[in-house]
Amino acid sequence: MLDKSNLHTEISRMLPSLTLGECLDIRSYKRNRIIVICREEVNRYLLIENGFSQQTMEGSEAYILKALKKAFKKEFPRSNKLRVYKEGVTDPYALSTLKRKTL
């Protein structure tokens, strides 16, 4: 679990280290709102939002980090702690609907 204030810097540090097909799964404390970031190509990422709104965005690292700031404000407005899971090579669409243990 990471603090929301440090999350953006941690994600920007983690993105370049992802191999092709690896994903980051970011969830609220209750695990009911989800943001998945997956590396598709060398400099292309996929961001899937599954919570208050369902969106899919694709772009470079800078574009994804900028979109991630907006997604954090929309999906996690009152959350202080967020869960980050680093997943192996998986289907990001299946990961965004994966049910993890709920509280």
Image: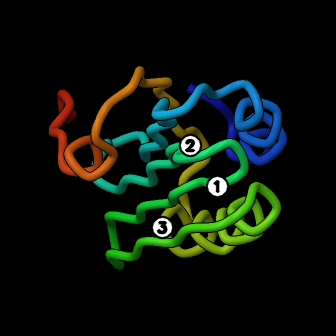
Label 2, secondary structure: give it: strand
Q: CA distance from mark 2 to mark 1?
A: 6 Å
As shown in the figure, which amino acid type bears the numbered disc 1? Answer: Arg
Camera-side residue: 22 or 35?
22
Identify which residue is drawn at 48% across, 42% down. 26
Quadrant (top left/top right/bottom left/bottom right) for the N terminus: top right
Q: CA distance from mark 1 to mark 3?
A: 23 Å
Asked if residue 19 is positioned above or below residue 35 in the image, the reply reads above
Quadrant (top left/top right/bottom left/bottom right) for the C terminus: top left
Q: Is residue 49 left or right of residue 79?
A: left
Q: How is the image coloured?
A: rainbow
Task: Name the residue carrying label 2.
Answer: 39
Task: Name the residue carrying label 1.
Answer: 44
Camera-side residue: 42 or 97?
42
Q: CB atoms at circles 2 and 1 under 8 Å apart?
A: yes
Q: CA distance from mark 3 to mark 2?
A: 21 Å
First of labels 1, 3 by sequence position: 1
Q: Is residue 103 left or right of residue 6?
A: left
Label 1, secondary structure: give it: strand
Identify which residue is drawn at 20% across, 31% down. 100
Task: Name the residue carrying label 3.
Answer: 75
As shown in the figure, which amino acid type bears the numbered disc 3? Answer: Glu
Neighbor class of circle 1 (other Cα within 10 Å; few <14, some 14-19, many 20+) is some
